[in-house]
């Protein structure tokens, strides 16, 4: 069988801002369609910067970065970005926030309405479209933010600590919902988190970054079967992986040998 071409090809990518220090040093990996890649590492190791490079929001300083064989700036229509802050416009309802990207792209109102309703239903907010952000909980606002990203039918979903500000229970629910949504959607995810447990739960691959300069230190495959559920968190295999990767991360943070 001929292997399918990677959806992301990143080879010897370097990044520095202006004449500042090297932020990312020779980062090399490929991602296959459907990968769920968790990015973890010490503060300042360049995780968010890598997402911005993938999104074409900032140029690489050196190296080769392609999204579906194209430079990131030519692939922006295939990407959606979800940030830690839900970034909703307070004067628009949840539904109006969700449809904003399509409105900006000139999509006709009837097609917008259908996509909006579908996306809100996906995140279990089908009946809250008329609510304003101030009337929603933190978890619901993040669901709206996810729904807004899904209306773009992205091939690649870039998530920068999307659940970092939420309490643990809400975060665990949203982790499970995200994986359920993934069963019906074909996106590839890059998910930045400071939580090893969250990264292990969601990902089939974890990239552990080291800092100064930021670099890809180690890749770990997470072979736990999908669908993953609350029972996954109770499993020995899951807990062992969380312990092992937490230990690795502590060593990366303190500079001890891995
Ligand atoms: N626009 C910018 N101009 C200059 N330096 C920047 C810019 N954006 C990021 N940096 C620097 O790049 C380095 C990596 O930042 P980045 O936000 O990518 O790290 P991170 O791993 O996501 O950190 P954290 O886990 O704390 O969010 C930091 O030293 C940061 O100060």
Image: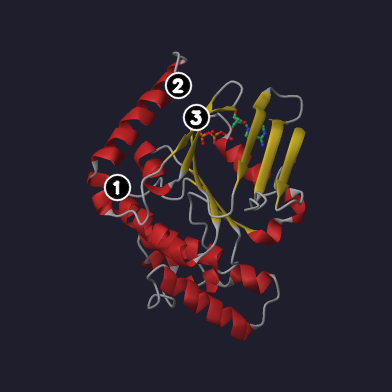
For disc 3, the marked residue is: 43
For disc 1, the marked residue is: 168
Q: SS class of the residue under badge 3?
A: loop
Q: SS class of the residue under badge 2?
A: helix
- Residue 177 in the image: state x and y as whole percent: 37, 61
Q: CA distance from mark 3 to mark 2?
A: 9 Å
Q: Residue at x 39, y 75 (%)?
A: 128
Residue placed farthest to the front in the image? 1
Q: Is 252 on the left-hand or right-hand side of 81?
A: left
Mark nearer the N terminus (1 vs 2): 1
Circles 3 and 2 in contact, beta carbons < 8 Å = no
Q: CA distance from mark 1 to mark 2?
A: 24 Å
The answer as to whether callout 3 falls within 8 Å of ligand 1 is yes
For disc 2, the marked residue is: 253
36 and 145: which is toward the camera: 36
Where does ligand 1 appear, by image quarter?
A: top right
Quarter of the rendering occupied by the C terminus: top left
- Residue 45 in the image: state x and y as whole percent: 55, 29
- Residue 199 in the image: state x and y as whole percent: 41, 42
Mark nearer the N terminus (3 vs 2): 3
């Amino acid at each position: 069988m001929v292997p399918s071409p990677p959806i992301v090809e990143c080879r010897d990518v370097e990044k520095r801002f202006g004449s500042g220090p090297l932020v990312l040093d020779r980062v090399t990996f490929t991602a296959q369609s459907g990968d769920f890649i968790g990015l973890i590492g010490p503060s300042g190791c360049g995780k968010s910067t890598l997402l911005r490079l993938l999104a074409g929001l900032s140029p690489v300083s050196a190296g080769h970065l392609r999204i579906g064989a194209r430079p990131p700036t030519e692939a922006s229509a295939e990407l959606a970005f979800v940030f830690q802050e839900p970034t909703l416009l307070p004067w628009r309802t949840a539904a109006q926030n969700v449809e904003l990207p399509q409105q900006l792209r000139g999509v006709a109102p009837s097609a917008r309405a259908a996509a909006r309703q579908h996306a809100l239903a996906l995140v279990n907010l089908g009946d809250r479209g008329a609510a304003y952000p101030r009337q929603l909980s933190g978890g619901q606002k993040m669901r709206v933010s996810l729904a807004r990203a899904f209306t773009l039918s992205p091939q690649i979903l870039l998530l920068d600590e999307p659940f970092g500000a939420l309490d643990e229970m809400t975060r665990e629910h949203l982790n499970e919902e995200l994986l359920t949504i993934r069963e019906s959607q074909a996106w590839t995810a890059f998910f930045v988190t400071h939580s090893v447990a969250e990264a292990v739960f969601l990902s089939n691959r974890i990239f552990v970054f080291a800092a100064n300069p930021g670099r890809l230190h180690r890749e770990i495959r997470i072979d736990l079967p999908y669908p993953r559920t609350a029972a996954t968190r109770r499993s020995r295999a899951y807990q062992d992986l969380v312990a092992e990767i937490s230990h690795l991360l502590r060593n990366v943070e303190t500079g001890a040998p891995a």
